[in-house]
Image (spheres, rainbow, N blue to C red):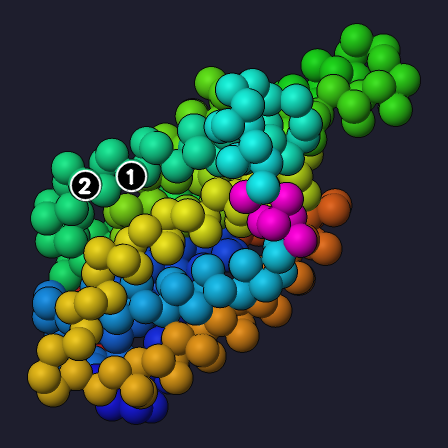
Amino acid sequence: MTLAQALFMGLLQGATELFPVSSLGHSVIIPSLLHWKFKQSDPTFVPFLVLLHLGTAGALLVLYRVQWIAITRGFFTAAVRGRITTGPERLAMLLLTGTIPAGILGVFFETRIKSLFASPYVAAGFLVVNGVLLLGFEQLRRRAERRAALESKPRAEQEQSFSEAERISFVAAALIGACQALAFFPGISRSGVTIGGGLLAGLRHQEAARFSFLLATPVILAAGLVEVPQLFASGVPVVEYLVAAALSGGAAYASARFLLRYFRSGRLDPYGWYCAAAGLLSLGLLALNL
């Protein structure tokens, strides 16, 4: 991988990771569409992508630095005390609960999952699936909103019926974490399925995005500990890759700020239609070898 390609991949990763469009799917598909010479089956490709994800995690730590201090303090306080008494303590335990499913699946299915990264056809197919999932999440959420309206509740009560992240149940957090595990498949967006899972759990769009972004950080950091050491082999341009990771972090920070504003009133539908169209178009281009 050349320096220009590494920097392009870093920018692509950072710009698309937090958008519900699957940065991993784009990272597998686009090099094949551009006919780049490096192979996604190379043993250093997945560690390189994980390094770029670490740039994203760094951006999220900066963005939520105040909350993470409170969450970390709340986790140890609740663990020592043996009970949960505050919002940050409950959020810490909810994030732990949501992290467990992805961690278990990552450990037991690591080899099989990595084999999917070598196929742009698989990634394009899953990108279509991702689009269908996003559209389905929004359809189910709209039904819930219509039911609330039919119950003739005042507008303020309808808004309160969609709770904040700290108030969801631990079962809901585990289900959102299970949704996160789907993102091991290239083409399935981690942020998309976790935001969608948050909507089904009763979160507002903006709160679902916040919980999704917080939930991403522990999984990305854990993956980094496992994969990134493989980059320190002879012949791997580590410095260039680190520059790409820094570029990824900067793009991810800007993306996160934009999305948190967007989800104050925006929905997942536009991204669902984009993923379905991009996946079908990619399958066509790959089949024609254009």
Quarter of the view holding residue 6: bottom left
Q: Position of residue 215 (x, y in %)?
A: 48, 43
The answer for how far apart the CA atoms under marks 1 and 2 are is 6 Å
242 and 84: which one is in front? 84
In the image, the segment drawn in magenta is 66-72
**Picture coordinates of residue 182 (x, y %)?**
32, 39
Residue type indicated by callout 2:
Val
* Prevailing secondary structure of the magenta residues: helix
Check the image and report above or below for 179 versus 33. above
Residue under circle 1? 103
Q: Is residue 265 left or right of residue 247?
A: right
What residue is shown with label 2? 107
> In the rendered image of this protein, does residue 102 appear above or below residue 45?
above
Amino acid type for the residue under numbered disc 1: Gly
Local secondary structure at mark 2: helix
Secondary structure type for disc 1 = helix
Q: Quadrant of the C terminus?
A: bottom left
Query: Residue 283, can we see it?
Result: no
Residue 111 screen position, x and y as percent: 10, 48
Residue 126 x/y as whole percent? 29, 47
Closer to the camera in the image, 181 or 67: 67
- The answer to whether residue 246 is above or below residue 132 is below
User: In screen coordinates, is 240 left or right of 233?
Assistant: right
Point 72% across, 55% down: residue:
261
Q: Is residue 290 left or right of residue 87?
A: left
